Amino acid sequence: MEDRGKPGRVVIDISWKSLFRIMLAALLGYAVFLVWPLFKLVLLAILIAAALYPIVKWACRRGWPRWLGLLLASLTLLVIVVGCFGLIGPMVYQQAAALSKNLPRFEEQIASRLPQSVGGAFQSKISESAVSNSQQILGSVLSVGVTTVHGIFDFLMILVLAIYLMIDGERTIHWLRVFFPLKERAKISKALSESYELIVAYMVGQFITSALAAAYVFVLLTVLHVPLALLLGIIAGIFDVLPIIGVILSVLPAALMALTVSPGTSLLVIILYSAYHLCENYFIVPRVYGKKLKLSTLTVLLSITIAGTLAGITGAIVILPIVAAYPVIERLWLRTKLEPDTVQSHQTDT
């Protein structure tokens, strides 16, 4: 930038080198935008591969061939998938079909048990929605079909990527590590090792807590004779992946469905959902995760809100182990750039 000629006149000169850098940055940003859907699948595959890789390590420690450990890990993944979709899937589909068939009756029952003003507004809103969307049913069905096909394809892609990551993950990491300066390679290896432990703790812990949440909700709603108990239990297990927000998203449909039984049942469902949520936060999670994944409630809420806004449900799922890995980065790379007591203070606080 320089001042030429007349006072107050400013001339900005931008070199070709600077223009090239700007164009390159824009091109890289556009490339990231294009490959972002694939990148999200890779992140999920990394989480799955990291959770299953301890099976490979266990086999190797016993002196078995590595290929046998990979086979055991792949079979474990296959058994989980078949168990979820082959056994539970048909029952969930039956309950979803029953929900679609009996939806008008459920709407009437819910509206009749709400206060008159609220119930009338609820039923009126449902009726208006049904009329306004009646002409879009075919398009909605086709859209759901296309989304289902894409979802199945993405799911299969994640499984294939997870298996290949278990097979070639270590070699790929070693290949990438040599691009960094020699003095940084030891830190990178240590950071990857500790991050791997965090990912394993997160995946195994999340599987256990989601399974417990689904089982609790299924048993609770079955005992209270609430319709669609299995479907609502599966919903609770899925939304359990999202701390704080998940319990709100799962309790609302359960409370509405419990209204078809009685208002007291609906209130009891809300109370018992909340009680389980407190038990999970303060008793189950600390024992399942241990000290591997300790995050403040505010950090969790902000992290999943931002990641969910930017990257949807995938971002909300993968963000927690990434955020939990920050202390590793702080300890290995930022210690010398921060105040002497910063790292120690953060470790004490967590």
Image (cartoon, rainbow, N blue to C red):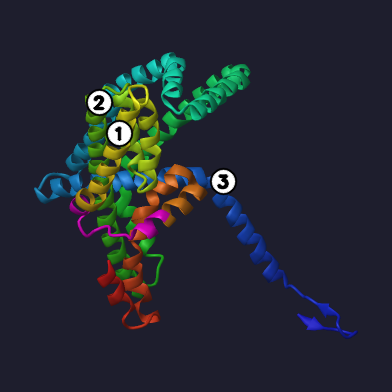
Q: Is residue 5 above or below residue 116?
A: below
Kind of residue indicated by mark 3: Leu
Quarter of image, res 1:
bottom right
The residue nearer to you, when weighing 301 against 275, is 275
Q: How many marks?
A: 3
Q: Residues within 10 Å of mark 1 (few under 14, many from 20)?
A: many
Lower sequence index among marks 2 and 3: 3
User: Would residue 232 be visible to someone looking at this image?
Assistant: yes
Residue at 29% in and 25% down: 230
Q: Is residue 160 visible?
A: no
Disc 3: which residue: 34
Asked if disc 1 and disc 2 are in contact, CB closer than 8 Å, the reply is: yes
Is 209 placed above or below 80 here? Answer: below
Q: With 302 as the anchor, is 142 left or right in this view?
A: right
Write down the residue under mark 1: 269
Q: CA distance from mark 2 to mark 3?
A: 48 Å
x, y percentage for residue 78? 26, 31
**In this figure, which residue is indicated by the disc labeled 2?**
224
Dot 2 crowding, Cα within 10 Å, few <14, some 14–19, many 20+? some
N-term-proximal mark, 1 vs 2: 2
Mark 1 residue type:
Val
Is 289 contained in the magenta span?
A: yes
Q: Nearer the viewer, residue 297 or 330?
A: 297
Q: Which residues make up the magenta segment?
A: 286-301
From mark 1 to mark 2, how far is it between C-alphas?
Answer: 9 Å
Secondary element at image label 3: helix
Q: Residues within 10 Å of mark 3 (few under 14, many from 20)?
A: few
- Quarter of the figure with the C terminus: bottom left
Furthest-right residue in view?
6
